[in-house]
Image (cartoon, rainbow, N blue to C red):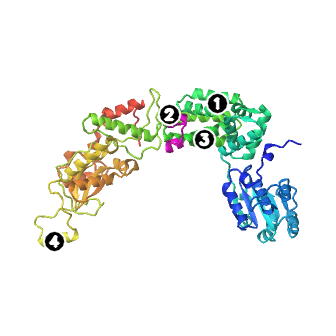
Amino acid sequence: MNYRVFARKYRPQTFDEVIGQDSITTVLRNAIRFNRLAQAYLFVGPRGIGKTSTARILAKALNCQNGAPAEPCGTCDSCVEIADSRSLDVLEIDGASHNGVENIRELRENISFSPLRGPFKIYILDEVHMLSAGAFNALLKTLEEPPSHVKFIFATTEVQKVPATISSRCQRFDLKRIPPRLIASHLQHIASKEQITIEEGAAQALANAADGALRDAESMLDQTVAFCGQQITEADVLALFGLTPRQVVADLSALVFEKKTSDALTLIADQVANGRDLGRLLGDWISWLRDLLIQQSRANTADSTIQTQAAFINQNKLLELLDLLAETQSRMKWASDPQLQMDIAIIRAAHLLERASLDDVLAALCLLGESHQKKMSGSALPLVPVSGSLPSSPEISPATGGTLPLPTVTIAPTIPRSDDLPLALPTRASGEAPSLSEEPPSPESSPAEVKKRKKRKPAPQEASPDLSAAAIWETVAQDVADESPVKFGWVKEAHNAVFDGNDLHVCLPNSFKAQFESSVFGNIQALLEKQISQKRGVATHLRIDFVEAMPSSSLLPSQDAYLNTTMNTSSASTAAIDPLKDFKNDPLIHKALEIFKGTIQIVSP
């Protein structure tokens, strides 16, 4: 008797033997059992997962002579003939070689004849997407209303090429890839039947390499038996198919995380010398990193190596590394030198892990600020405003003597406190700029004029009379700055607070507008309004008036002088200020430069 390969010898013959497609076999059983049969079925899925085998089992179940409902017996003449592909009632047609209109015309002529043995005449069209457009059109009417004794079963790996007019006339079943654990279990079953001893690791390696295709795994097992006989070890499988051991993938990941680039490149060179497939190695590495990501999110593995590496790397860095490797995998498919692409990916990964992100810088500065604030016992830290939006990904070189590219820094003039200014401004709409022509009501105003003004502006809610606007603002700004000096210390630079009804107006230089509106600092206005309302005792809205620059306090003898100076800032008042003096002497800045080994760079706008 001729030798039969495992893929044919252990082909499923009943619904129970179909691996990994339980939901589909259940539907087909019930359709037969309750006599709810469609005129056409379409089986969709990748290679080697059981499309044609399921079609044959369905045909046997429909024409079986002795079996129970929905289960073929496998022993009657009809089942045996269908299994051997010699049944006159079940015709298997290859769509690639019978794809013309004349083939479909011949099929339409033959379907009018009754079946010879069973109740149905069944046509199985494999790779149906290979039919021509004319053949599909010629099949439409017959497919929609065939004779009652005719059933069509289509199978395809490229369903997108099947016209919607055909698929809409069929019941579609999408067969999925088979999980590796089920494939490994099936290989162990075959080995036991064939008196073969196979290690569990070897079966798992074959299952992983098959990529969900059971037929591929069975063919690889056949090839392995021919290579090493009745004793199959994991090392034999890895050597035969050029697969990479899991430990090598874990070692490669560890070397990259520890920034041992030279050792990682040496490992890759050794794998190439041993005939390993670098494309498969890269795919295994991506799968390993995915396991680390899942471990960080759900902590659902008992593998100590995965637990250790998942705790070692930041999740944001892990996501960036996965993006880098996915890009490399796409390029490697068309590269003439895969090793070069792999080496480049490892070097880029090392640079990626060394680079500090904006989140890293902000977190480090926040920790430094909080630590320094505790040492200073609550004393305020001198901060320098950052003008413009923050960079998306500043790069920090950790090498000794390197530089730290900082965001563009603009030193604003020192803003004086002006608690001695008049505390009331003329009534104006929220957000409207102050008008120089407005004046407070004169003491000599008549009662009628006062009454008229009251009708125009409703009286504010009752508030604590002993708290001035300047005092409330100074307290709130200090409290907010104490919570996080790095993030909110700049709010203390706003002064000249005045009440306008239930609005508190403060002036802030334009150089702070980016910080006030940036999402990096959160909803700072809501935080300030909440604390102002608590201090004052009534709901109060904060209105920020952004001005070009703040004048010196010696130029503010009155409110009108302040407003005039705000609108017409004197350049002479800011010329004598050294913008880097306080910044260079700031202990927080000294500490940041020491940690990141950088220098200050002032970039002109």
Residue 172 vertical placement versus 470 (above, below): below
Question: Label 2 crowding class (10 Å Cα cut-off): few <14, some 14-19, many 20+?
Answer: some
Question: Label 1 crowding class (10 Å Cα cut-off): few <14, some 14-19, many 20+?
Answer: many
Q: Which mark is residue 268?
A: 1
Q: Nearer the viewer, residue 407 or 120?
A: 120
Q: Tag 3: residue type?
A: Ser
Name the residue that disc number 4 marks: 451
Residues under labels 1 and 2: Cα distance?
21 Å
Q: Position of residue 61 (x, y in %)?
A: 77, 60
Q: What is the magenta segment's predominant secondary structure?
A: helix
Name the residue that disc number 2 marks: 354
In this picture, residue 293 sits left or right of residue 342:
left
State the extent of the magenta-drawn residues as a range.
293-310
> Which residue is at 43% across, 39% downward?
360
Residues under labels 4 and 2: Cα distance?
70 Å
Q: Is residue 159 magenta?
A: no
Q: Position of residue 444 (x, y in %)?
A: 10, 66
Name the residue that disc number 3 marks: 287
